[in-house]
Amino acid sequence: MATTSLDTTGWMAIDTGAGFLALDAKLAIRLGVLDTLPARAVDFALRPLARLVIGDLTSDQISPVAVFDSDIVTRVTDHGVLGLLGYHVFRDRVIWIDYDSRRIALVPAGTDTHDEDALAVADSRRGLGGVLSRSAIPTRFRMTVDGKILLRARVTPNQGGRATPWLNLVLDTGASKSTLFEDLVDARSHTEAWRPAIKGLVAPTL
């Protein structure tokens, strides 16, 4: 949960697929960072957010701040969601999430100075102390300029088609389903034959 400088304590979604802090447009007006509802599905506030408090983490003068209609997130989560916590909020933190116990830890991040995976993994484990269990699987990733986490992975369908070649996938904690852009997947994978599948989803992105 997060608290802003006014009495606006409420739920916010941690969304590693979003580059910035994003607030519901009506809330943004109440907080004074926006004057009127935006004409576009996703826009940016005119002024920085004075303060955001998440547990013991306090961030001041946050900018840029994206604004959008959070009703779509509220419908998906069945909670009144004030906004999304994107990369810019956590750019100097390691985000540890335990979905079973519904806990997160925001650990100060170190610097990646190793070219070899083994050295990088060992350094990361030391920095995270006792947070990681022995069953944790280390995976190195790339970070785009707008803060998206890129992983290399392959996808094998339950039925029909073939496994994909190695793909660049975005790790998005704000997504409720795993999604492939069909036109970018190798035609030899025959994704049109994959089952089960949902096609034709359209949604604004941050």
Image (cartoon, grey):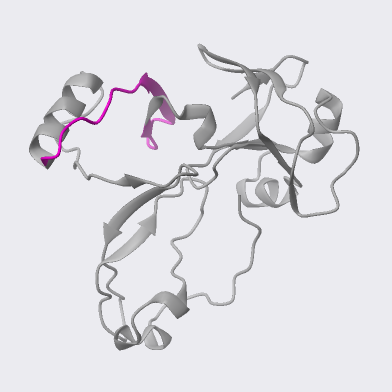
Position of the N terminus by quadrant: top right
**Residue in front for this viewpoint, 115 or 139:** 115
Q: Residue at x 55, y 45 (%)?
A: 18
Compared with 204, 5 (above or below) is above
**In the shown orientation, is residue 94 left or right of residue 90?**
left
In the displayed structure, does residue 50 sit left or right of residue 150?
right
Quarter residue 193 falls in: bottom left
Q: Is residue 68 above or below residue 101?
A: below
Can the viewer see residue 59?
Answer: yes
Asked if residue 15 lies left or right of residue 191, the reply is right
| Residue at the (36%, 52%) spot, across then down | 150
10 drawn magenta: no
Q: Position of residue 136 (x, y in %)?
A: 20, 38
Q: Is residue 130 visible?
A: no
**Relative to the observer, which residue lies in front, 182 or 161?**
182
Residue extending farthest to the right is 36
State the residue at coordinates (52%, 42%): 15
At horizontal 36% and vertical 20% (from top left) the residue drawn is 107
Residue 111 covered by magenta stretch: yes
The part of the chain drawn in magenta is 96-116
Task: Identify which residue, 64 or 24, lies in the foreground.
Answer: 64
